[in-house]
Image (cartoon, helix red, strand yellow):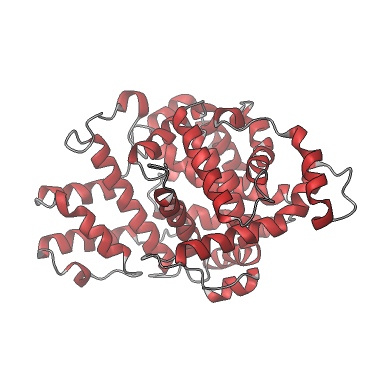
Amino acid sequence: MFSKSNLTIDFLESKRAIADPLADNTISAIIDEGYEDRINEIFITLHRNSSFSKNLLSNFPERIQQIVANYFEESGRMPEWADKTLIEQGQQVFSEYGPEVFMLLNLKSLPMCYSCANGAEVLYDTGRLVEHNGQIDPLVRRLMETAQMVVNVLQPGGLAPEGEGIITVQKVRLIHASIRHFLKSPKFNANGWDINRLGEPINQEDLAGTLMSFSPIILSGLQQLNIGLSEQQIAAYTHCWKVIGHLIGLNSDLLADSFEDNWELASAILKHQAAESKQGKALTNSCLAFIKHMIPGNLFDEVPEYLIWFFFQDIQKAVNKPLTEMIGIRDHSSLKDHLILKFSQIVSAHIAKAEHHILVQKMTGEFNKLMLQGYIRHYNDGKRVRFVIPPSLTENWGINHY
């Protein structure tokens, strides 16, 4: 059971030694059967299918099929406290404000994860978020996977029994366990993994921090955009992510009911973990480069960095740490007047003396849809794995469906 009184350094530090026994034991069982070198083949098979059945792994022995089937059966159980009505109401928030949520995911949630130095090292060491030889494809793949998970869990029916969102979270949980195994294995990671310094890879504290970046951090970003959600909408969206937290293997004492408690948890984790790191800066630079790559022309080139700076202001104040500096984002308060001049003819002729929040509200309406459209266009253009948004959502959001 969650309690704000638990949010001490000792409590959070203890969570760094805990990972996910169910998923970890599943990967260990597969390896014990002698199939370590074919784990990737299992993931490819699971990735290509939006549902799970035991016969998907018919190329493997019965024992392997049963191990994976047992995992999917146990990890797919919804908690008794899950509220179907609240889940549907929370998903409706996403249906209404999906482009804004998607933009905040890239310009607030993920960069905030990069500010946690130890967690950023996991992302960096897996090599899945960083450019290699000037190529952005690894970054594209990881951002697409994150965005696809959010779409799958928050689309209508995503968290219904055997819903696509539940299956997606189960797969992500299994991938996390695989990453933990290979990062700690001398056979695959010659540099080793310093558990005493970093904790378990993708441990409970890091996982909770990521969940918070998708829940209260997104809600605070919507507030910064002057989107006035009702208390019921906030509670429903929060409940959705509490359910997702349970499904992805978070301990119950890290699952809070209210926005306020989740904000306190996010703040506590950032106070404990936020620090400057070369990995966090590299990840942020890669994210910025990709976003700019997605937006046609150069009109918005200065906007992503400015928006990260803007959206960080509330949580940065709450934790009293220079989070933007930690990930290499300069103070952009002086950039406002330049951007007002640049966008005045496009967004409004009456923003000459606008405050930061007014400028952000005006220009993001166009920016967030361009960015989302860019993701869809880029990733679905001849790629083997598509970024899929249900037609009902693309119609709500006013974007083209490919």
> On the picture, is 305 further left or further right than 356?
left
* Residue 373 in the image, given as x and y percentages of width and height: 58, 63
Residue nearer the viewer, 23 or 291 = 291
Residue 43 occupies quadrant: bottom left
Q: Residue at x 39, y 65 (%)?
A: 383
| Image label count | 0
Residue 17 occupies quadrant: top left
* Residue 240 in the image, given as x and y percentages of width and height: 53, 58
Q: Residue at x 67, y 50 (%)?
A: 300
Residue 126 in the image: above or below residue 219: above
* Residue 140 in the image, given as x and y percentages of width and height: 45, 53
Residue 104 in the image: above or below residue 159: above
Residue 316 in the image: above or below residue 67: above
Q: Residue at x 50, y 27 (%)?
A: 272
> On the picture, is 169 further left or further right than 289?
left
> On the picture, is 58 further left or further right than 388?
left
* Residue 117 in the image, given as x and y percentages of width and height: 46, 30
Residue nearer the viewer, 55 or 380 = 380
Q: Is residue 216 visible?
A: no
Residue nearer the viewer, 114 or 136 = 136
Q: Is residue 317 visible?
A: yes
Residue 289 in the image: above or below residue 13: below
> On the picture, is 196 further left or further right than 209?
left
Q: Residue at x 31, y 67 (%)?
A: 48
